[in-house]
Image (cartoon, grey):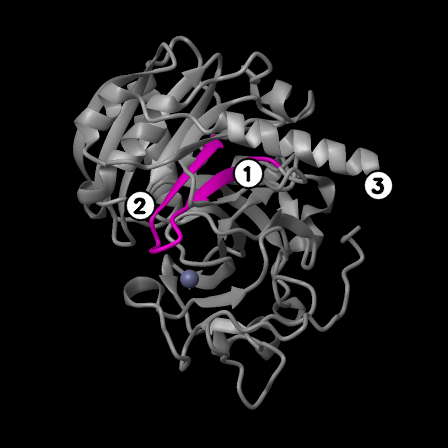
């Protein structure tokens, strides 16, 4: 007991010491006044970044790959996220070329039309001695700014949904970002020697030759209309969905948001094959798509992280663990955004078997935002450990 107290005092002392006074120049330029800054140091990847002392920090979920650390304002949906892209860059490709390739693949996967993402500003900035690429723009989901920072073969993103008026906080955070001695310079260093980096030329377009390269049991993963299930274990309240208190607008209005804590296992709702898995800067956060047959694609957005050893074109079975839910991208709380698209257009999920959308309460599947029902245990999947 005594030892525990001693340790916690030590932690407290370390926290106090890590409160750094705003750097005079940054303060004068930003006009953000007397914000008190704390320093977050990532225990696994060694990077550090300053953030306002009154903000909430959601650490990565270390069970998967590609997780982000999220820094959230207590007063509004303003947030800053730091993460590692799951695609690598070779020295033959410039950071700008790589970013263009990555964004093209991610935006295609997110079914953004090329005209829907507008980059208003692009410039190079210095971050921890590296030449980094900063972009600012708008998507149909949110305003965004991101800074891509190269480190060996890896590229790190510092993303925000901040508008220009509050950009000073983001600017300060980017300027304070530092890599550590143990920061991985390759994705295999980060995720293990069998990790397969995301290939940017795959996108969501799965070529027949990719499919034919899949495991021999791929034939058994063919579309199985009766085999659909909820993309998680048990029941979760719907916070946003058709007929509920809030509905999605525009293209994804048939999507359903299921409230769940960060780190909840997300399962394949149908058999199929992996399309995209990775960060999408336009507001989707970490996005997973799974293709079913030739036309249907299921979407799982705002994820915290993905399971290891996932690749585009890989076959997956209904109910198998694919990712962990999160609060990434343009969100105001932890949830899983789930939708099914037919030819890039979201379909009314209620036309699919009811287990896909049913929250567990047939009389009222809609619950107020933030409502939790105690996480009743439902059927488990044989492939969930
Ligand atoms: Zn949603």
Question: Circle 3 sits in a helix, a strand or a loop, which is it?
Answer: loop
Determine if residue 198 is in view.
no
CA separation, marks 1 and 3? 34 Å
Q: Nearer the viewer, mark 2 or mark 1?
A: 2
Location of residue 237 with respect to 200 vertically, above or below: below
Q: Magenta span covers which residues?
A: 65-84
Determine if residue 62 is in view.
yes
Q: Give the image location of residue 324, x and y in percent.
A: 61, 49
Q: Report the residue that reaches farthest toward the bottom.
A: 363
Tell me which residue sits at (62%, 27%) in the image.
43
Residue 367 is covered by the magenta coloring: no
Q: Nearer the viewer, residue 255 or 347?
A: 255
Tell me which residue sits at (57%, 42%) in the image.
305
- Identify the mark nearer the N-term, 3 or 2: 3
Q: Nearer the viewer, mark 1 or mark 3?
A: 3
Q: Give the image location of residue 253, x and y in percent.
A: 35, 69
Estimate how packed mark 3 is, as few (under 14), some (14 to 19) or many (20 or more) residues with alpha carbons within 10 Å.
few
Estimate how packed mark 2 is, as few (under 14), some (14 to 19) or many (20 or more) residues with alpha carbons within 10 Å.
many
Residue 72 is covered by the magenta coloring: yes
């Amino acid at each position: 007991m005594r030892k525990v107290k001693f340790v916690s005092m030590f932690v407290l002392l370390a926290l106090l010491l890590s409160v750094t006074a705003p750097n005079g120049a940054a303060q004068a330029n930003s006009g953000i006044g007397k914000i008190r800054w704390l320093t977050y140091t990532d225990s696994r990847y060694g990077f550090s970044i300053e953030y306002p002392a009154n903000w909430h920090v959601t650490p990565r979920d270390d069970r998967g790959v590609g997780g982000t650390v999220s820094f959230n304002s207590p007063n509004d949906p303003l947030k800053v996220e730091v993460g590692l892209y799951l695609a690598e860059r070779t020295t033959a490709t410039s950071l700008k070329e790589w970013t263009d390739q990555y964004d093209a693949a991610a935006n295609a996967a997110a079914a953004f039309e090329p005209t829907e993402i507008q980059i208003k500003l692009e410039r190079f900035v210095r971050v921890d001695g590296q030449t980094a690429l900063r972009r600012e723009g708008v998507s149909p989901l949110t305003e965004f700014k991101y800074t891509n920072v190269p480190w060996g073969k890896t590229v790190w993103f510092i993303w925000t949904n901040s508008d220009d008026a509050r950009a000073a906080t983001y600017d300060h955070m980017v300027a304070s970002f530092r890599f550590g001695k143990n920061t991985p310079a390759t994705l295999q260093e980060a995720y293990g020697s069998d990790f397969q980096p995301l290939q940017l030329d795959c996108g969501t377009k799965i070529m027949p030759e990719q499919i034919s390269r899949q495991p021999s049991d791929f034939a058994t993963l063919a579309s199985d209309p009766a085999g659909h299930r909820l993309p998680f274990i048990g029941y979760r309240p719907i916070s946003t969905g058709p007929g509920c208190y809030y509905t999605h607008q525009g293209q994804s209005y048939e999507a359903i948001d299921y409230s769940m804590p960060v780190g909840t296992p997300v399962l394949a709702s149908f058999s199929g094959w992996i399309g995209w898995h990775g960060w999408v800067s336009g507001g989707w956060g970490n996005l997973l798509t799974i293709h079913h047959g030739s036309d249907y694609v299921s979407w799982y957005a705002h994820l915290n992280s993905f399971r290891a050893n996932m690749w585009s074109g890989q076959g997956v079975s209904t109910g198998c663990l694919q990712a962990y839910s999160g609060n990434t991208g343009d969100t105001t709380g932890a949830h899983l955004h789930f939708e099914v698209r037919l030819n890039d257009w979201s379909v009314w999920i209620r036309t699919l078997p009811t287990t896909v959308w049913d929250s567990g309460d047939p009389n009222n599947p809609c619950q107020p935002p933030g409502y939790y029902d105690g996480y009743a245990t439902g059927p488990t999947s044989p492939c969930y450990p």
